[in-house]
Amino acid sequence: MGLDVANGVANSKVAVITGITGQDGAYLSELLLTKGYTVYGTYRRTSSVNFWRIEELGIEKHPKLHLVEYDLTDLSSSIRLLQATQATEVYNLAAQSFVGVSFDQPLTTADITGIGPVNLLEAIRIVNPKIRFYQASTSEMFGKVQAIPQIESTPFYPRSPYGVAKLYAHWMTINYRESYGIFGTSGILFNHESPLRGREFVTRKITDSVAKIKLGKLDVLELGNMDAKRDWGYAKDYVEGMWRMLQADEPDTFVLATNRTETVRDFVTMAFKAADIAIDWKGTAEAEQGLDAKTGKALVKINPKFYRPAEVELLIGNPEKAKAKLGWAPHTTLEELCRMMVVADLARNERGFSF
Ligand SMILES: Nc1nc2c(ncn2[C@@H]2O[C@H](COP(=O)(O)OP(=O)(O)O[C@H]3O[C@H](CO)[C@@H](O)[C@H](O)[C@@H]3O)[C@@H](O)[C@H]2O)c(=O)[nH]1
């Protein structure tokens, strides 16, 4: 039994976190280890598995962190995982999580992101129905939003194969809760970012590019739809919310968000500002450019290849329920988050880091 550092008591809790190589998997592992959990973090066999995130957090050699090869699309693998680990909590963070890719790979996305979680729910039903299950649902399920701001009861209207797949898994979690009494909780998380974000997502693409431009390693940042509005929070705040959801008395559905929305363009301006570069926006629609206010040099351009077949134009969530029932609130402003990411990417680019 480990010592729960936060509460000073013995902790025999065992968590399985699928998707340990991702941003949320890394932060959640760090959080649960500090709480004394034994953590089994799963990763998928690929030719180049990369643990740079848990290495950056310095937890890759933690004695209570075990890395396990596992495939979410395989039921027998899911059953063996729960039997072997004796898990008390399962956090399903594994997914094909890039919205843009889901338009090119809709069936793979459906398999991993939609049906994958049902393998875990079935495994829980078979191995130990008392295991608590967290499903990483998403604000992408709101898609073409039916109300502003979005809350737990807002009707869904997904706009991507990824959003549709996530919605299936979301309802299956609720269905297993209602049908079999499984503690299946779904967190509808709005966009959450950090220095550990992958560069395929827009915020990190921006902060990494801004750092490269500042250091003279890149001329121009090319983006798609800069009018899209997102409710961006800090991933570290959000994994705390996931953990709180599984400590509640009852399984439920919760929105985690900041209740503030900004355009991609605003985030670009903010990121350049964090690197002491002022941007002037010129032109309209496809011809829009961001110019260096001092030199007039083009630093940002639209490239239509980054547009999506269908777009989610506006997301903004109200986390009132999580606040009232879980005592959860975001603690990091978008300006602080953006600056943290730019500073990290400046340091990384200076030392030639490439993830
Ligand atoms: N990735 C990317 N997005 C761009 C670009 N240019 C504009 N965008 C716009 O930036 C917005 C955010 O894109 P992403 O950062 O890729 O995130 P997302 O599509 O909102 O999805 C993320 O958040 C979801 C929660 O709402 C998550 O579920 C999902 O896995 C992912 O983390 C989208 O409207 C996208 O069209 C670009 O060059 N790259």
Image (cartoon, rainbow, N blue to C red):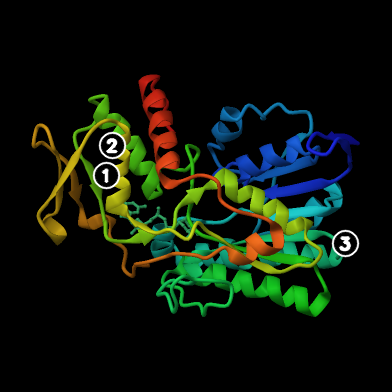
Q: Which type of secondary structure does the marked residue at label 1 adopt?
A: helix
Q: Is residue 235 visible?
A: yes
Give the distance between the C-alpha atoms of the residues marked 2 and 3, in whole angstroms. 52 Å
- Identified by mark 3, the residue type is Asn
Q: Give the quadrant of the N terminus.
A: top right
Do we see residue 76 in this rendering? no
Helix, strand or loop at mark 3: loop
Q: Nearer the viewer, residue 316 or 348?
A: 316
- Residue 273 marker: 2
Q: Tell me if residue 122 comes above or below residue 154 in the rendering.
A: above
Q: Which mark is residue 269?
A: 1
Q: Position of residue 190 (x, y in %)?
A: 50, 59
Under mark 1, the amino acid is: Thr
Neighbor class of circle 3 (other Cα within 10 Å; few <14, some 14-19, many 20+) is some
**Which-is-in-front pick, marks 2 and 3?**
2
Disc 3: which residue: 128
In space, the residues marked 2 and 1 are separated at their CA atoms by 6 Å
